[in-house]
Amino acid sequence: RYTAEAALQDPWIVNEIKQQGTVPLDALHINSLRAFRGHNRLKRVALHAIARRLNEKHIQHLKEVFVSLDKNQDGVLTFNELSAGVASLEGDTANAVVKDLEEVMRDIDTDASASLDYTEFIAASLNRRSFQEEST
């Protein structure tokens, strides 16, 4: 029986990951992450519930961004992985984000694990339109 680590090293998995390529983090994702930290606790919990229930096709792009940021493929984003994604942004956006990235990440990290799991990232990155369309 495979362990999770052994499964990630399987040639088929490694090949699939290479074929997926890198999906860059963009300014819209950063704006969503910043906006999430301004929400009250109830709204954050509601967004987590919505993120868990959304249809995969509605969040496919966010999933691809998460996977491309998760360099060590452990299923969570560390500060270093997120800041590397921010560093790939062009121009003044990267400089502005880096200043408060640690605070943004701390506010999004609802379980105080010092990393963002998949659901935390999706909930914080959701575009309002995504979950409004799903509910109709």
Image (cartoon, rainbow, N blue to C red):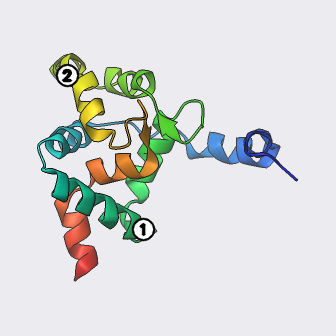
Q: Residues within 10 Å of mark 2 (few under 14, many from 20)?
A: few
Residue 7's spot in the image, x, y percent? 77, 46
Query: Which circle marks residue 57 in the picture?
Result: 1
Residue 7 vs residue 133, the one in the foreground: 7
* Residue at image location 21% in from the left, 42% down from the top: 28
Residue 88 vs residue 129, the one in the foreground: 129
Query: Which circle marks residue 100 in the picture?
Result: 2
Query: For the residue marked with disc 1, what is the amino acid?
Result: Lys
Residue 71's spot in the image, x, y percent? 55, 30
Query: Which circle marks residue 135 in the picture?
Result: none
Furthest-bottom residue in this view: 136
Image quarter for residue 114? top left
Q: Secondary structure at mark 2?
A: helix
* Residue at image location 73% in from the left, 47% down from the top: 13
Q: Earlier in the sequence, mark 1 or mark 2?
A: 1
Q: Residues within 10 Å of mark 1 (few under 14, many from 20)?
A: few
Query: For the residue marked with disc 2, what is the amino acid?
Result: Asp
